[in-house]
Image (spheres, helix red, strand yellow):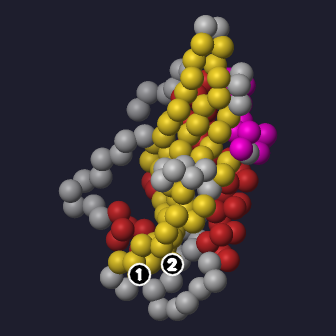
Amino acid sequence: MPAGTTLPTKTLDRIVAIASANSGITGSRVARGYTRYADTDNLQALVAGLTPELQGYFSAWLKDVTIAENEVYPARIVGELLLAVPKDASTDLNAAWDFAINFAASLTADTNYQPGESKPSRVAFSLHTIDTITAQGIAIFDFGAYGKGGIEFPEV
């Protein structure tokens, strides 16, 4: 995919790079924008096969941008983080929440951004749901994909 050339798309590329560097997500489990999985892929099964609450899939895309002459106004990137939930035991979800919180904190760390990119001013997310599939659960953390939260960066 081509690299972003505007502040919002460069920032999206950086967020994807940060997610790719996360040891619990890695580059093979990160999607940017629209992702078409092969007909033989089953995303739920792929997530369910990961270490519960410690590994996941992350997708992000640019949602809102407002532009006026010579100015870029606030923009919002949205996404979702999918984590497996243990299949044979109850859980307080502490490990899953810690994973999501630490990942979100990495998205706001100054050191992760380079000139020409905008560090998010706010990252808000919530536990959207736990989907139950055959003998397994998938915790879906909503980074704005389902309407709550998002990755927002300020007026430039």
Which picture quadrant has residue 45?
A: bottom left
Find out whether residue 140 is within the magenta segment. Answer: no
Give the residue at the far right of this rendering.
110
Q: Residues within 10 Å of mark 2 (few under 14, many from 20)?
A: many
Residue at image point 69% right, 61% down: 101
Residue at image point 29% right, 64% down: 42
Residue at image point 27% right, 61% down: 41
Check the image and report above or below for 103 versus 35. Answer: below
Question: Which residues fall within the magenta stretch?
Answer: 109-122
Does residue 109 appear to the left or right of 80 in the view shown? Answer: right
Viewer-proximal residue among 153 and 4: 153
Check the image and report above or below for 80 versus 4. Answer: below
Viewer-proximal residue among 35 and 122: 122
Which picture quadrant has residue 69?
A: top right
What's the residue type where badge 2 is placed?
Val
Viewer-proximal residue among 36 and 22: 36
Q: Which residue is mark 1?
A: 136
Does residue 156 appear to the left or right of 11 in the view shown? Answer: right
What's the residue type where badge 1 is placed?
Gln
- Image spot of residue 31 (x, y percent): 45, 47
